[in-house]
Image (spheres, helix red, strand yellow):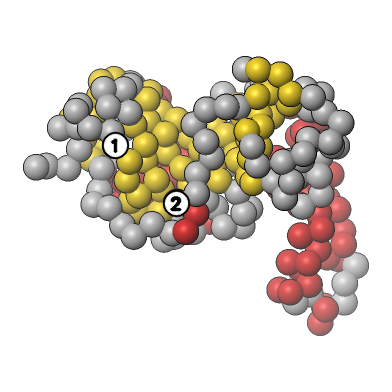
Amino acid sequence: MSEPVLFLADRGEAADLAAFLGRLLHYDKAAAVRLRAQAGGQALAVFGRPPSFEVLAVRTARLLKPYEDGIADTLDVTVSAGELLDTLDEGTATATVPAAVTGPPWAGVLPPLSGWERVAGFPDADALRALVKAAVAEFRARVEELAPEARTRGELDRIGGEVWSREIGASGAPVRIVHAAASLGFLRGAEVDLLAAGAWVRLRSAYGSVAVRRASATLGGLSVSPL
């Protein structure tokens, strides 16, 4: 049986998927992605984990029709992001699913498919962009304050951990989730919200989502409402 072929809805979907894969490869040349599509479905979910941010990035793509040779089956496979990008033809808006690879540990622990509730009181997109800008400025200023010999990888990681792990209000979401969304091109436009499901929180925009497991499932003083 030939490898499944993905027929994306249009060239724009193909270009957006190519851009997402390219960003993942920028952070990890050996990046893997997990692909999910329901049997007979017309949407593909692509999961990746840029190592610099310690989050899961999720990009969905509309399919023109269910993937070839896979109409009766659910597509759920982990593949090389580079190999998938190599097969992606933006002109025809198609991609061939590469052979499966041994998945990294994160690929076996994905966010739930359902049960998400919107977190009320989360900052809007403009405030989040300002938050990222301020956090980046703080990180750079603290690094510049160090003597050259003190700028070790361990010290940079320590400062980064303090800045990016800081909680946004009482949402249970760390600043790193917004930093990752901005770096991956997801934090565009005016619409953005935070969703929660069990131990997970997910920052969602029209361009993609970034999810992370919280240390605690408690949402502090913020309330949640059904989607």
Residue closest to the eye, 139 or 170: 170
* Farthest-out residue, left: 1
Label tally? 2
Residue that protrudes farthest toward the right in the picture? 145
Q: Which mark is residue 75?
A: 1
- Residue at image coords 23%, 40%: 96
Instruction: Determine which residue is flagged by label 2.
Output: 108
Q: Which of marks 2 and 1 is nearer the N terminus?
A: 1
Q: Is residue 163 left or right of residue 75?
A: right
Which one is nearer the viewer's eye here, 68 or 127? 68
Question: Whole-percent x and y of residue 5?
Answer: 21, 35
Quarter of the picture containing the N terminus is top left
The residue lying at 17 percent from left, 42 percent from top is: 3
| Cα–Cα span, label 2 and label 1 | 15 Å
Amino acid type shown at disc 1:
Leu
What numbered label is drawn on residue 18?
Answer: none
Whole-percent x and y of residue 32? 40, 53
Q: Dot 2: within a 10 Å radius of its alpha carbon, few (fewer than 14), some, or many (20 or more) residues?
A: few
Q: Which quadrant holds residue 173?
A: top right
Q: Can residue 11 be seen in this view?
A: no
Note whether 183 is above or below 130 in the view shown.
Answer: below
Q: Is mark 2 on a helix, strand or loop?
A: helix
Q: In which quarter of the image is the C terminus?
A: top right
Q: Which x, y percent locates residue 73?
A: 23, 32
Mark 2 residue type: Gly
Mark 1 nearby-residue class (10 Å; few <14, some 14–19, many ≥20): many
Where residue 159 appears, x then y in whole percent? 81, 63
Front: mark 2 or 1: 2
Q: In this view, does 153 lie to the left or right of 123?
A: left
Q: Is residue 79 visible from the viewing direction of this image?
A: yes
Q: Is mark 1 on a helix, strand or loop?
A: strand
Residue drawn at point x = 71 percent, y = 73 percent: 153
